[in-house]
Amino acid sequence: MKDVKYILFGIVFGVLLTKAEVINWFRIHDMFLFKEAHMYLIMGSAIATATISVLLIRYFKVKTLHRKEITIEAKGLNKGTIIGGMMFGIGWAITGACTGPIFAQIGVGVWPAILTLIGALLGAYSYSIAKSKLPH
Amino acid sequence: MGEILNLWPWYVAGPLLGLFVPFLLIVGNKLLGISSSFPYICSIVLSQKYYADSDYNALSSRWKFYFAIGITLGGLVAKIFLGAGGISYLPQYYYTVRGLIFLLCGGFLIGFGARYANGCTAGHSISGISTFQISGLFATISFFVGGLLCTHYIIPLFN
């Protein structure tokens, strides 16, 4: 049950995504058309803030609330990072949503996003079946 | 106070979104990410027996499922209390049968691609780059290559 508290984190995250319109197809479209800096500034400032925070955590050897060492899982680079990443980008441009925003779109009442979610679940399931045959 | 009902500027929302990386690390030693919630939901819908994926660890992804429920509620909260309801989030085109099929296909690419790339914009672009992982940088470039190609060459075909 200790994972239930992440609902609260999610609510704040979802409000931010929604109110900054990271979940808006038109903003994503204008980002890919280089018409609007909004999305680039959001991502850039989020990455910058996260990077500084991680440096501070490492420098001061910050522990978790349970006084444990903070460990960061390493993600390997392989062909899937590139091929899968490009597939993801195409999906992002079509639907105007990446993973978090799909859920926020549903919450804010954009009902067609339910189809996006069903598609994403089918996609994740298909990957689990196809995985052994794909280049990695 | 009326401003809170308008679009929140990047310099407010961006840094606050970025702070989720240290908060989640400190609270639960979790690295921000969302796309592993998809296999978790699949494993609930299909039951563990039918969703067998050796690399996928249901227990370590479970928190992302609750996080995703929270994000959904966050959208609802923004709609009810923060004036996020009366905005057009999708072109009218998507409210047709063809548009919905288009969304289903786009969603498929998101789910398949995020699992294949082992992360999405949260897990790779924000968490990956901020923790100095080369895979995060390559994934982010790939997201944009795919998105740019689609926006400039595929989407115009449908309008």
Image (cartoon, helix red, strand yellow):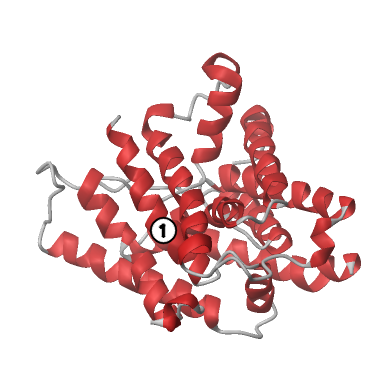
Give the tally of numbered discs: 1
Residue visible at 63% across and 44% down?
Answer: B111
Crowd around label 1: few <14 · some 14–19 · many ≥20 (10 Å): many
Question: Quick one: SS at disc 1?
Answer: helix
Q: Is residue B114 above or below residue A50?
A: above
Within the image, what quadrant is residue A66 found in?
top left
Q: Which residue is mark 1?
A: A13
Near-viewer residue (B65 or A54): B65
- Report x, y in % for residue B101: 83, 48
Chain letter belonging to callout 1:
A
Answer whether residue B32 is visible to the viewer in this image: no
Within the image, what quadrant is residue B145 found in?
bottom right
- Report x, y in % for residue A89: 65, 60
Where's the N terminus of chain B, which quadrant?
Answer: bottom left
- Report x, y in % for residue B20: 33, 59
Residue visible at 58% across and 22% down?
Answer: B51
Residue visible at 34% across and 49% down?
Answer: A8
Left or right: residue A96 compared with residue A50: right
Answer whether residue B91 is visible to the viewer in this image: yes
Q: Is residue A2 above or below residue A47?
A: above
Left or right: residue B13 compared with residue A91: left
Residue type for callout 1: Phe
Where's the C terminus of chain B, which quadrant?
Answer: bottom right
